[in-house]
Amino acid sequence: MDRRVDRVVPPIMNSRSPISTVIAAALLTHVSAAFAQMEPSKVVVVKAKTVSAPVTTTLVGTVDPVRRSKVGSEIAGIVTEMPARQGDLIEAGGVLCRLRDDVLSLWLAEAKASLNAAKSRHEELLTGTRQDELVRLEALFDEASAEYDRWKFEMGRIEKLYDGRDSNAKEYHDTRAEYLAAERRRIAAKATFDLGVAGPREEVVAQAAYELAVQQARTDRIESDLRKAEIRAPFTGYVTARLTEVGEWIDAGGPVVEMIDLSTVLVRVDAPESALPYIKVGEKVRVQVDALKQSFDGRVKHVIRQADDSARTFPIEIEVDNSGQLLAGGMFARATVSAGPSSNVIAVPKDAIVERDGVANVAMVVPGEHGGMVGFLVGVTVGADVGDWIAVTSGTIQPGFQVVTRGNENIPPFPTPVVVVDEQGTPVAVPASAPPSSHGGPN
């Protein structure tokens, strides 16, 4: 019996039942035939090597959203609509809640009318006196001048008569009063005409500009309040709780919904104080999420240098991209971080790592029992990244072992025929040395 096939057959042969023996024999015959007919897979291999890498440790932690917010209302009002519900993914700017806004709309209409009046007044002053108004003012000045000339002549005549005692005192005083009044009217008409020619004073124009600015600010404030009657999402995220309902009154600053941002997540782990000197912000970290049977690449975002008094551990936050929206808040996670000085460890190329069901595997290639080469997957524990290589800390791989970097996605957990090729697909010879069976190779 091919000992490679024996690895994949359940231990049914241990049963003494005649029926079990027959079934097992038939199964072995079928698997042996299938194995013999398998086409060898083409693979590219690289030797595992020893590198210097930091000592690592795996810490357990929890996935947290990068941002959590209780979104509040900036104005007070009665809720008329609540389109957002728990679990909804709301894009940034999406409507979460609407408040009653009819009174604000009326205030805005009133403010806009006053604003238009202030604009017209200001524009009128900037334009200056109209030509037809200047003609009118000039005509009034000419009329006042003619009236003044008439009473000036009359005053001279009366004065001569009065001096010759041909006019009485009342007639003299009445004529003088009319003359002085005509003189003042002429002065006033002249001043009015000159003012019209000069246009409005700078101070008057400035005052109109200030009044316009005040009214514009009032209008802008009401428009802003009207926009705030629609409470919108400040960022793209999921609604986790509704904190008000239709018909309720909300005070300014009152909460509407709670949202979380999962575009990226922070995996929070607690590191022992002995590891703290070796964990650096920006360090690359591998995060394993068992529920998803998948690992993610992350970076140390925050090292919080305040220990928990009871556990003497330090919170570490690892930022992980979550553009695929696979991760959710509260998930259990494991992160591998630096925990000691660098030492010599076994490493394989990163392309040699194959993840299946959340477990890291490396495909090894060894000589087959009956000639040729066979490949098979072995589970490994990985450590720190070293450039394009990654440390393997489980002891399964030893220096010099041939590990598959291309074609490993086709290698099953049991030995299967392979052909070793170069990057161009040309078959190449592989050294006949094989890893000892204690490290996972076939007997």
Image (cartoon, rainbow, N blue to C red):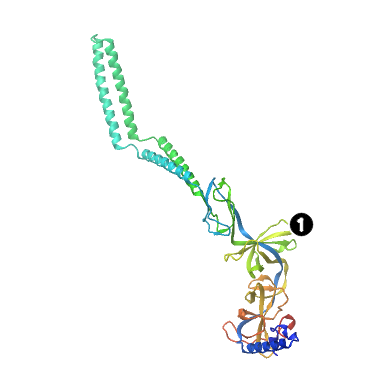
Examine the rendered structure and indicate whether residue 269 appears above or below residue 79.
below
Q: Position of residue 50 (x, y in %)?
A: 70, 76
**Count of numbered tags:** 1
The residue at the far top in this view is 165
Q: Which amino acid lies under the numbered mark 1 shown in the image of this protein?
A: Ser
User: Is residue 70 toward the left or the right of residue 174 in the image?
Assistant: right
Q: Position of residue 82 (x, y in %)?
A: 53, 53
Seen from the viewer's position, the closer of residues 244 and 419 is 244
Q: Residues within 10 Å of mark 1 (few under 14, many from 20)?
A: few
Examine the rendered structure and indicate whether residue 245 appears above or below residue 331.
above
Q: Quadrant of the N terminus?
A: bottom right
- At a point 73% along the width and 56% down the height, the residue shown is 308
- On the question of residue 124 being in view, the answer is yes
Q: Quadrant of residue 371?
A: bottom right
- On the question of residue 289 being in view, the answer is no
- At a point 26% along the width and 27% down the height, the residue shown is 143
User: Is residue 215 toward the left or the right of residue 267 in the image?
Assistant: left
Examine the rendered structure and indicate whether residue 244 appears above or below residue 428.
above
Seen from the viewer's position, the closer of residues 433 and 395 is 395
SS class of the residue under badge 1?
Answer: loop
Q: Which residue is mark 1?
A: 310
- At a point 32% along the width and 34% down the height, the residue shown is 197
User: Is residue 22 toward the left or the right of residue 230 in the image?
Assistant: right
Examine the rendered structure and indicate whether residue 196 appears above or below residue 176.
below
